[in-house]
Image (spheres, grey):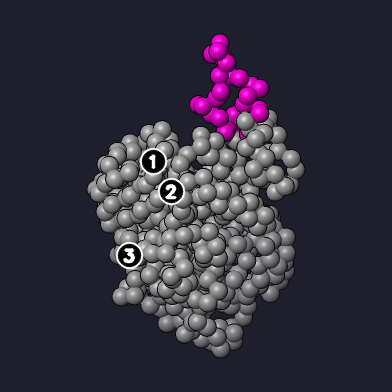
């Protein structure tokens, strides 16, 4: 069994995007190292480099001070390194036992799977979380039938089944309830006593201080600090994670509390609940741009999808003063709601179709039958001009556009319907700086025209620079509302991490 692993001056690029430019991490047996940083700092990339999922472009990995090349997850596993990612690797149609032992099934002397041993070993692993399941899990239960927290447990058991010396827990607690987290931390303590090592990637300050011995902070792809946990405070960690000299180039003149409250209420949400949301309540006034902050996966997407009628919810929604129940996106569209997704490839565009067809996708019914195509082209052309859409022509496939211009089409197709309430789900993700500036100016203009915008972004600077106020989500609830002098990147990051003393209101 190895005793140490070091990542030294790691560089990793994805095309023109530099995910890691100088990443460093040291981990030794018998300890837990917290790998922390704000959104997009490079934590997951560092985890994937150590696990062999991605191959580094520069720097080196040292195993017991000797260079090692981790060309794949299989090589990492052979060296005793295992990772639990937040994105599950389980196959839903297979059983619990089949998922845990896939490609590593205990065999009989005749070369067949030893079903008896598989069941015994699976039962032994399942017993590690005994008392935390909603109902007893059996080895032959199909994974698709399990709730999200229990799927995450199976992912953990799959990772520890080969008895690795180094465990990387990348947001492994995000789907677990408090009992399950407590049990996982008891197991981590046992692993430490057994001389194993753990890299703990988490956004939760309480968990970091509870379980970690040392910390390493990434910021914009660089390691900017490391040390022992009992020698640092929450506030000091938050300050390490923030680039103080960073200045957001576009700042919108926000509405004051008095200005916004004098306008009609466009949207009022009371005790909204889904499988992820745990009682969300807030109001948004006409002409406001309200940001939704917090780390990814805290309920922001569920909130937007609920308000677009795409996720079933409990609770009350008032739209323009009238109570409504949104059961389908068609109902939301009829009521003047539009949702602009950030994942344009999967949710926003038909890449093999023309720019015209994509811009008019939600609106063709407006042009009658037979279709008044010349009028549709005229309106689409006007939208293209207003968005400064750089294209050869409306008949060109949308796949011919740059990423930023393709995202303009995603936004433009909904603006064609003249919505009153615009829901934005991380719309500038993967968009160049110039196009972002155009987006920001457009959003400002829309608010001045009386449109109301609810805007989730994974870019904290974007939220601080654009929003009248920011609702910070944490574990499916709105933890904090920031506005005015309290709306700073430091406060936003602190609230997102669940820091208890980092927010200055």
Residue where numbered disc 3 is placed = 224
Sequence-wise, which precedes: disc 2 or disc 1? Answer: 1
Secondary structure found at label 2:
loop
Residue 29 circle label: 2
Residue visible at 66% across and 45% down in the picture: 129
- Crowding around mark 1 (Cα neighbors within 10 Å: few <14, some 14 to 19, many 20+) is some
Could you tell whether 312 is left or right of 243 in the image?
right
Quadrant location of residue 181?
bottom right
Secondary structure found at label 3:
strand
Q: Position of residue 385 (x, y in %)?
A: 35, 63
Q: Nearer the viewer, residue 132 or 370?
A: 132
Could you tell whether 22 is left or right of 235 in the image?
left
Residue visible at 31% across and 60% down in the picture: 222
366 vs 294: above or below:
above
Q: Nearer the viewer, residue 502 or 265?
A: 502
62 vs 279: above or below:
above
Secondary structure found at label 1:
loop
Q: Which residues are magenta?
A: 93-120
Quadrant location of residue 38?
bottom left
Q: Position of residue 353 (x, y in %)?
A: 41, 43
Alpha carbon distance from label 2 to label 3:
23 Å
24 vs 460: above or below:
above
Q: Position of residue 363 (x, y in %)?
A: 52, 54
Q: Residue furthest left?
A: 58
Alpha carbon distance from label 3 to label 1:
27 Å
Residue where numbered disc 1 is placed = 2
């Amino acid at each position: 069994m190895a005793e140490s692993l070091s990542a030294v001056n790691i560089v990793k690029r994805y095309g023109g995007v530099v995910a890691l430019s100088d990443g460093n991490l040291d981990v030794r047996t018998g300890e837990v190292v917290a790998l922390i940083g704000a959104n997009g700092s490079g934590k997951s990339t560092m985890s994937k480099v150590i696990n062999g999922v991605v191959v580094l472009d520069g720097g080196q990995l040292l195993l017991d001070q000797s260079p090692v090349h981790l060309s794949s997850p299989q090589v990492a596993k052979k060296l005793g390194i295992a990772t639990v990612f937040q994105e599950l690797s389980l196959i839903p149609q297979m059983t619990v036992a089949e998922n845990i032992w896939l490609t590593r099934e205990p065999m009989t002397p005749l070369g067949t799977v030893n079903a008896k041993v598989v069941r015994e070993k699976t039962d032994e692993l399942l017993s590690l979380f005994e008392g935390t399941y909603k109902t007893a899990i059996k080895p032959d239960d199909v994974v698709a039938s399990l709730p999200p927290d229990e799927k995450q447990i199976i992912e953990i058991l799959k990772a520890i089944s080969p008895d690795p010396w180094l465990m990387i827990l990348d947001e492994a607690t995000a789907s677990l309830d408090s009992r399950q987290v407590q049990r996982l931390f008891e197991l981590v303590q046992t692993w430490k006593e057994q001389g194993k090592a753990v890299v703990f990637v988490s956004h939760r300050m309480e968990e970091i201080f509870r379980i970690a011995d040392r910390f390493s902070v990434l910021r914009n792809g660089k390691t900017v600090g490391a040390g022992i946990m009992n020698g640092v405070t929450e506030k000091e960690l938050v300050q390490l994670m923030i680039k103080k000299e960073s200045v957001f180039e576009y700042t919108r003149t926000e509405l004051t509390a008095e200005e916004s409250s004098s306008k009609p209420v466009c949207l009022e949400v009371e005790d909204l609940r889904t499988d992820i949301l745990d009682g969300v309540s807030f109001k948004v006034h006409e002409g406001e741009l309200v940001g939704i902050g917090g780390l990814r996966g805290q309920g922001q997407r569920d909130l937007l999808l609920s308000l677009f009628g795409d996720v079933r919810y409990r609770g009350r929604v008032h739209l323009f003063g009238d109570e409504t129940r949104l059961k389908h996106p068609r109902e939301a569209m009829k009521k003047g709601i539009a949702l602009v997704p950030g994942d344009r490839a999967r949710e926003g565009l038909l890449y093999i179709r023309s720019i015209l067809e994509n811009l008019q996708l939600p609106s063709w019914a407006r042009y009658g039958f037979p279709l008044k195509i010349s009028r549709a082209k005229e309106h689409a052309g006007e939208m293209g001009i207003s968005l400064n859409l750089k294209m050869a022509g409306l008949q060109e496939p949308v796949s011919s556009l740059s990423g930023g211009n393709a995202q303009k089409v995603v936004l433009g197709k909904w603006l064609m319907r003249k919505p009153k309430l615009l829901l934005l789900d991380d719309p500038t993700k993967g968009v160049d700086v110039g196009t972002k500036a155009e987006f920001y100016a457009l959003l400002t203009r829309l608010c001045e025209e009386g449109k109301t915008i609810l805007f989730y972004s994974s870019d904290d600077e974007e939220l601080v620079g654009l929003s009248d106020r920011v609702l910070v989500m944490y574990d499916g609830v709105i933890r904090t509302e920031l506005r005015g002098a309290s709306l700073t990147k430091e406060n936003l990051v602190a609230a997102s991490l669940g820091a208890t003393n980092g927010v200055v209101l």
